[in-house]
Image (spheres, rainbow, N blue to C red):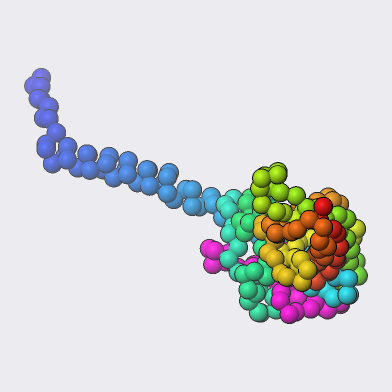
Amino acid sequence: MVGVEGKPPSKDLKFRIVVIVGIAVISGYILWFFVLPLVGRYERLDVLRYYWAKNNRGEIRLLVVDMDNNGTQDLIVSEIWVDGVRLENDSWEGWFGITVRPLYGETFYVAPKDFLFEMGRDYNLTVVASSGRQYSFVLNVNENNTRTENLKITGVYFYHVPPVTGGEVIGVEVQDLGGTDIIIREALINGSLYTVSPRFDLWSGHSFDGFEIGFPWKKGENYTVTIETIAGTTANYTATAD
């Protein structure tokens, strides 16, 4: 019997094997780190619940809406439209920002300027995400989902921040009597307009809270503080600086 001596693989064959293995490794890397994460990531916005807020003049000017993100990646809200009209950016915002995270959701307030919602009507709310996707919902206004704001100023206080040596500050304590979420961005002191920064939020679950405004008050003088919610409800209080 005659034996046959085996031949080592040629250089071309070795090269082809190296190329094939390299392509397989690179393809696997791309698939694992770039393709699969994108396939598994998506956003989906749903309205969980909502209500409309009526001010103390009977006008419906505020929508409070809880939104859920039932996807797997953050959804960033870039625009909000009502009945085909794009709202100005300062007419809406989330309680904690504009990002709706999966599993957590976010509550948004929508308060169009110079626009009143009407009882018994349907409104188309369109939310545009930074990804370009649009989500539209038809929301109805009725007696069952409309609440009336009711609040009062329970105290106005005069002090310094830091104490004694710091600048003059007026503290305003607000009580929520209507069970609605209250948002205040501006206040009047003796008729002069001041910005409340950061904005004052009083959730319906908390009946008392307060905010501060830097103001050069003088001891012994009277000051009238007037607040107005973004829905248009007003309250005032007069106190003497002591």
101 or 33: nearer the viewer: 101
Q: How many marks?
A: 0
Give how far across and how far down residue 119 sits, in percent. 86, 77
Residue, far front: 220
- Residue 61 within the magenta-colored segment of the rendering: no
Residue at position x 32%, y 41% in the image:
25
Left or right for 181, reference 10: right
- The answer to whether residue 93 is visible is yes
199 or 41: nearer the viewer: 199
144 or 224: nearer the viewer: 224
163 or 152: nearer the viewer: 163
Residue, far top: 1
Is 167 above or below relative to 47? above
- The answer to whether residue 66 is visible is no
* Quadrant assignment for the N terminus: top left
Give how far across and how far down residue 140 sits, in percent. 81, 72
Instruction: Please provide the residue range marked out in magenta.
Output: 109-138
Give how far across and how far down residue 174 sits, in percent. 83, 56
Is 120 above or below relative to 234? below
Is 17 above or below relative to 223? above
Residue at position x 17%, y 40% in the image:
15
Residue at position x 63%, y 51% in the image:
101
Quadrant of the rendered image containing residue 200: bottom right
Quadrant of the rendered image containing residue 216: bottom right
Residue at position x 75%, y 79% in the image:
115
- Residue 112 within the magenta-colored segment of the rendering: yes
Give how far across and how far down residue 106 sits, in percent. 69, 55
